[in-house]
Image (cartoon, grey):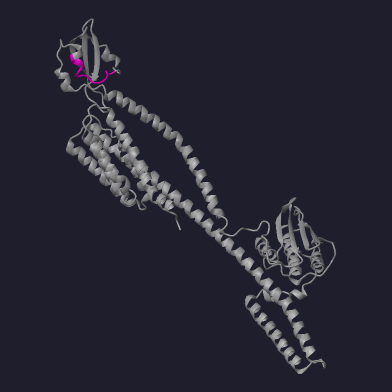
């Protein structure tokens, strides 16, 4: 169950992201609004930000509507005769990128772009704008819509491809876990069969002895009846045990020898050696009888280790060591590295009997399960170019089963390996993407800041034509200053500065309008002392 905090984070996450996106768009709009010479707060700031405030959250469910609203905000700038650039063109590009990332089919998006372009051109025709506005509507606005949309579609396709690949890896991992679980279950079935063979043998002996006691002449009639009931109960128990284990066994298990008839390890090693494999067996400690399940477990450790050595390191030398200690038995099977050239033997190398059931990783998985259930430990790992299997089995099977060294943990205890690798790859991809994006984004920011600074310089030195017409030669400089913009135009071409002026005068230059893309006429005001003596219109 999710906590309240987790639910709140999940609910406020998209809202916070939308708020941050809108705040960035609003910041650009406010900056551009402050830098304009005579802005209209309602048309150029309040209304566009309200429209974008609706478009950003709507983009999560209807990204096409968001793009259309952003295009309407950008197109409204075409009504300004002094400039064509819109500070909300970046907002249109961002929402178009999100359209490509969120929308699945390309056809509706292309129709949307066509409708936006038709609306922009129709607005240009109705307003009767100049050539610069037509160029802006035919180039900048479509580019701000189409190019980010293509980038968003590419990003969506890549994310889909990565997701499908990792989903495939996750499915394969689950299948591998299922195979390992089946191997453990098969090993448990073999253990149950061994229990039936050993315990059934003991129960049969008990029933046989009870039957013999029935014939004793020293027993009373009641004793004989009790022994008959005991013998029948034991016989029924043997039958029930046989039926239960028979249900668990599969076809391969029925072919295995019983626990009471398992051959000694010496015979297994001898027959393996006869097949052409170099095997050395060494025993240490006192040789004593072990419980059938423990003896069977030791046999399976040696058998599986020999099988893996023959399969994965043909021609290697195998050393088997069985050390009997005070209360446990240690089995160590080590094989050397496989030779580069496989030796020629008199007879073909064949695995030990019963080795074809479960080899390799699945065989070790089942072996770990058997050793764990017996209360022992198992370690299998490469060593000095070869491989080593080390198992420790207790003399008595205890109620607790410690986890074998190197045994895979349960699925609930550890995150999926594919999920962990996916997280790592996502982080690495994010860092690389950020690094690859840093250079063009940095260049774009420098260009944007430079362009904004230049626009600020050009728009704050505009002297309105009506104010220029109101100026009269002979006026005092202080009276003239009330009609002048914040600063003079500092980027006057040399050819314009070279035009003749009255001798002994100090001249100032101003732009006649705020058009940033075209050359405009310049206004020249010349002063003699504190008096305006001349005003001229110079061609841009």
Query: Which image quarter: residue 27?
Result: top left
The answer, for residue 472, to whether it is visible in the render is yes
| Whole-percent x, y for residue 298 in the image | 75, 66
Q: Is 432 placed left or right of 33 in the picture?
A: right
Residue shown at the point (36%, 29%) measured from the top left: 449
Closer to the camera in the image, 284 or 311: 284
Closer to the camera in the image, 203 or 348: 203
Query: Which image quarter: residue 292?
Result: bottom right
Query: Which image quarter: residue 517?
Result: top left
Would you say the magenta stretch is mainly helix, strand or loop?
A: loop
Look at the image and give the residue range highlighted in magenta: 479-489
| Whole-percent x, y for residue 487 in the image | 27, 19
The answer, for residue 144, to whether it is visible in the render is no
Closer to the camera in the image, 400 or 372: 400
| Whole-percent x, y for residue 77 in the image | 24, 35
Image vertical order of residue 6 relative to residue 537, above or below: below
| Whole-percent x, y for residue 507 in the image | 24, 11
Q: Residue farthest to the top?
A: 504
Quadrant of the image for the C terminus? top left
Closer to the camera in the image, 119 or 227: 227
Q: Is 375 placed left or right of 493 in the picture?
A: right
Image vertical order of residue 413 relative to residue 351, above or below: above
Q: Is 463 placed left or right of 173 in the picture?
A: left
Magenta stretch: includes residue 485: yes
């Amino acid at each position: 169950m999710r906590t309240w905090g987790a639910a709140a984070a999940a609910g406020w996450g998209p809202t916070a992201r939308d708020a941050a996106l809108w705040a960035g768009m609003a910041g650009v709009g406010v900056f551009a609004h402050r830098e304009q010479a005579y802005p209209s707060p309602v048309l150029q700031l309040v209304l566009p930000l309200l429209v974008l405030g609706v478009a950003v959250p709507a983009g999560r469910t209807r990204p096409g509507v968001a793009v259309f609203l952003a295009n309407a905000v950008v197109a409204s700038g075409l009504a300004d005769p002094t400039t064509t650039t819109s500070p909300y063109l970046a907002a249109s590009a961002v929402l178009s990128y999100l359209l490509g990332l969120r929308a699945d089919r390309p056809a509706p998006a292309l129709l949307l772009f066509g409708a936006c372009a038709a609306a922009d051109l129709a607005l240009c025709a109705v307003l009767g704008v100049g050539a610069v506005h037509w160029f802006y509507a035919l180039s900048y606005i479509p580019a701000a819509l189409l190019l980010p949309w293509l980038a968003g579609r590419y990003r969506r396709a890549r994310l889909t491809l990565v997701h499908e690949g990792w989903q495939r890896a996750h499915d394969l991992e689950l299948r591998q876990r299922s195979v390992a679980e089946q191997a453990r279950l098969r090993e448990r079935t073999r253990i149950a069969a061994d229990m039936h063979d050993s315990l059934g043998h003991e129960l049969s002996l008990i029933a046989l002895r009870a039957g013999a006691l029935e014939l004793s002449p020293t027993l009373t009639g009641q004793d004989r009846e009790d022994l008959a009931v005991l013998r029948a109960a034991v016989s029924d128990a043997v039958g029930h045990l046989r039926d239960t284990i028979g249900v668990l066994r599969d076809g391969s298990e029925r072919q295995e020898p019983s626990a009471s008839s398992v051959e000694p390890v010496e015979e297994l090693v001898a027959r393996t050696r006869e097949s052409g494999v170099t095997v050395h067996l060494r025993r240490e400690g006192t040789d004593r009888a072990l419980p059938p399940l423990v003896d069977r477990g030791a046999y399976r450790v040696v058998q599986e280790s020999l099988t893996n050595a023959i399969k994965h390191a043909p021609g290697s030398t195998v050393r088997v060591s069985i050390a009997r200690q005070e209360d446990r038995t240690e089995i160590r099977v080590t094989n050397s590295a496989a030779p580069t050239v496989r030796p020629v033997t008199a007879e073909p190398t064949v695995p030990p009997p019963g080795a074809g059931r479960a080899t390799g990783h699945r065989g070790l998985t089942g072996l770990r399960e058997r050793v764990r259930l017996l209360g022992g430990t198992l370690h299998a790992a490469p060593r000095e170019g070869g491989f080593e299997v080390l198992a420790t089995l207790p003399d008595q099977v205890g109620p607790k089963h410690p986890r074998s060294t190197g045994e895979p943990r349960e699925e609930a205890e550890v995150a999926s390996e594919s999920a962990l690798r996916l997280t790592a790859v996502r982080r690495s991809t994010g860092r690389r993407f950020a690094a690859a994006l840093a250079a063009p984004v940095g260049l774009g920011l420098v260009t944007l800041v430079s362009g904004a600074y230049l626009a600020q310089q050009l728009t704050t030195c505009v002297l309105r034509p009506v104010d220029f017409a109101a100026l009269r030669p002979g006026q005092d400089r202080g009276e003239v200053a009330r009609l002048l913009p914040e600063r003079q135009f500092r980027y006057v071409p040399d050819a314009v500065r070279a035009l003749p002026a009255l001798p002994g005068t100090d001249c100032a230059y101003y732009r006649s309008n705020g058009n940033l893309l075209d050359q405009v006429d310049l206004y020249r005001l010349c002063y003699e002392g504190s008096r305006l003596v001349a005003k001229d219109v110079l061609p841009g």
